[in-house]
């Protein structure tokens, strides 16, 4: 190396004698200075990278083999640092670390879907056995988009559980820049403080944000409130045999929300939006009987409030529209974004189109569907209720249980709240509301409440 080569290296914080020890040589071609970086495999030079020092231009020997630079260190013990380029690796060596290698071909513009089988990373197979014996790696790739893509791909191949990454200080995108601007001590600190590469599903306690206090409101059924609440971010399953009066329970809660200016979104597939759903909710809003309602002076105001605060998911205006789970959740998203919905009801579950994947059992499908519903509730901070019918009683007496819901025990296991409504005799205005599930940490407790429909107010109230 001549003085120009040495000056350029020293300007990057790399001692020229270190570069020489690594076999780096200088050359002058057409009046331009180049550095040649040898690649070794099994003790033999198998390739050279040639780098011009006055501008970023490089090439490799024609027909040269791709492998890791400085791969000889893979045979020892201890952590290995992987850089995006040879000069970053030399910067690491200048800071006192010997076990460092560099990829030969830089970073891709985008991460690769299947990096393990991609030609770009074929050079890693040259070191397969040695790499398997390494306990951990620091992926010291550049801090730009391409560098992050390279780190992602390397972690996928080497195993994220063995990998760490570096957070660069502002104004530096690689370790060579850190060495020049901040010195060897900062390079050492960044490597020592490298963070474990994230593995989806496993975390330290410090990775979790402090939980927000649960935000909730009462249901509007006074005797039910000690047992459960409308909690934002929660998922409730509500069950009971058909034609028992579950809609009256829901209408009481919906009307209470509307009266508190809480926007509601209702997917009511078994009840016509007009006049039945609208008028039932309006009667509960006004607290009047069926007979009083047609001439009640507040009827128009009730209609106006429903118009402002309630959106309806329905396919009655277009019978050809099939609403499956994905479409339903997209409509719910629109209701949240456009109308601010905070209480969302699907009534009933069996009326949406259920599309199972090939070879997917009903249990697997329902588990997947409930996970999607719960994710939606948490993401958009809504109280989401699903009305799910139980199987027919087949001569058995008494209320159904959550395990009786058609399809799967997932309804029990995954719900935050489980609510059951039952009337032993349809001819008698008396029934029970049974809170059969309250997830730990949520307000309320399991219990049974005797209730009736107050015909004077069109609301569910305590029987006592």
Image: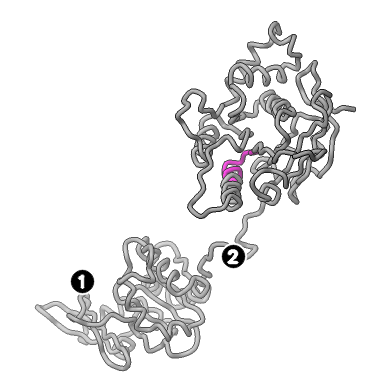
**Residue marked by disc 1:** 57
Say whether residue 49 is left or right of residue 373: left
- What mark, if any, has residue 202 been given in the picture? 2
In-image side of 413 versus 51 (left or right):
right
Label 2 sits on a secondary structure element that is: loop
What whole-number distance in Å separates the C-alpha atoms at marks 1 and 2? 42 Å
Q: Is residue 191 above or below residue 437?
A: below
Q: Residue furthest right?
A: 464
Answer above or below: position of 175 versus 389.
below
Q: Quadrant of the N terminus?
A: bottom left
Q: Nearer the viewer, residue 60 or 372?
A: 372
Query: Where on the picture, by quarter, is residue 181?
Result: bottom left
Q: Measured from the top left, where is residue 402 in percent x and y?
A: 73, 44
Q: Residue at x 53, y 53 (%)?
A: 360
Dot 1 alpha-carbon crowd within 10 angstroms: few under 14, some 14 to 19, many 20 or more? few
Quarter holding residue 252: top right
Residue depicted at 32% across the width and 78% down the height: 123
Nearer to me, 35 or 119: 119
- 184 and 218: which is toward the camera: 218
248 is higher (above) or lower (below) than 37? above
Per the image, is 155 magenta? no
How far from the left and from the top, in percent, is residue 412? Answer: 71, 48
Residue visible at 34% across and 87% down in the picture? 18
Which quadrant holds the C terminus? Answer: top right
Which callout, 1 or 2, points at the residue further toward the start of the chain? 1
Region in magenta: 376-384
């Amino acid at each position: 190396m001549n003085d120009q080569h040495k000056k350029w290296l020293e300007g990057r914080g790399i001692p020229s004698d270190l570069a020489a020890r690594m076999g780096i040589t200088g050359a002058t071609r057409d009046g331009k200075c180049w550095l040649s970086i040898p690649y070794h495999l099994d003790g033999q030079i198998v390739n050279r990278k040639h780098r011009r020092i006055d501008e970023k231009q490089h090439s490799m020997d024609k027909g040269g083999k791709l492998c890791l630079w400085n791969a000889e260190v893979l045979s020892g013990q201890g952590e290995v640092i992987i850089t995006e380029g040879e000069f970053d690796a030399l910067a690491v060596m200048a800071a006192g670390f010997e076990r460092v290698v560099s990829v030969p071909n830089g970073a891709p513009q985008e991460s690769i879907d299947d990096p393990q089988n991609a030609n770009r990373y074929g050079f890693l197979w040259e070191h397969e056995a040695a790499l398997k014996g390494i306990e951990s790696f620091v992926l010291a790739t550049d801090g730009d988009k391409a560098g992050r893509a390279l780190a992602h791909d390397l972690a996928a191949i080497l195993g994220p559980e063995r990998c760490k990454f570096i957070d660069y200080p502002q104004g530096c995108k690689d370790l060579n820049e850190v060495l020049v601007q901040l010195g060897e001590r900062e390079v050492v600190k960044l490597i020592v403080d490298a963070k474990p590469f994230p593995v989806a599903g496993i975390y330290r306690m410090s990775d979790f944000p402090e939980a927000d206090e649960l935000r909730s409101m009462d249901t509007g059924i006074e005797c039910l409130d000690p047992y459960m609440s409308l909690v934002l971010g929660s998922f409730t399953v509500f069950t009971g045999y058909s034609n028992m009066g579950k809609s009256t329970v829901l209408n009481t809660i919906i009307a209470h929300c509307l009266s508190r200016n809480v926007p509601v979104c209702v997917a009511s597939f078994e009840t016509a939006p007009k006049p039945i759903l609208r008028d039932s909710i309006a009667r509960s809003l006004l607290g009047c009987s069926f007979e009083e309602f047609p001439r009640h002076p507040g009827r128009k105001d009730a209609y106006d409030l429903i118009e402002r605060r309630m959106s309806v998911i329905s396919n009655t205006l277009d019978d050809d529209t099939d609403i499956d789970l994905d479409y339903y959740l997209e409509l719910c998203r629109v209701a949240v974004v456009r109308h601010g919905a905070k209480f969302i009801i699907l009534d009933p579950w069996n009326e949406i189109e259920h599309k199972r994947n090939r070879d997917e059992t009903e249990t697997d499908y329902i588990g997947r569907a409930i996970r999607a519903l719960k994710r939606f509730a948490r993401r958009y901070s809504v109280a989401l209720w699903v009305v799910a019918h139980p199987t027919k009683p087949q001569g058995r007496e008494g209320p159904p249980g959550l395990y009786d819901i058609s399809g799967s025990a997932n309804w029990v296991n995954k719900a935050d709240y489980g609510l059951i409504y039952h009337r032993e005799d349809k001819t008698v205005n008396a029934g029970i509301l049974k809170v059969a599930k309250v997830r730990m940490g949520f307000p309320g407790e399991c219990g049974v409440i005797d209730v009736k429909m107050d015909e004077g107010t069109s609301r569910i109230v305590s029987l006592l």
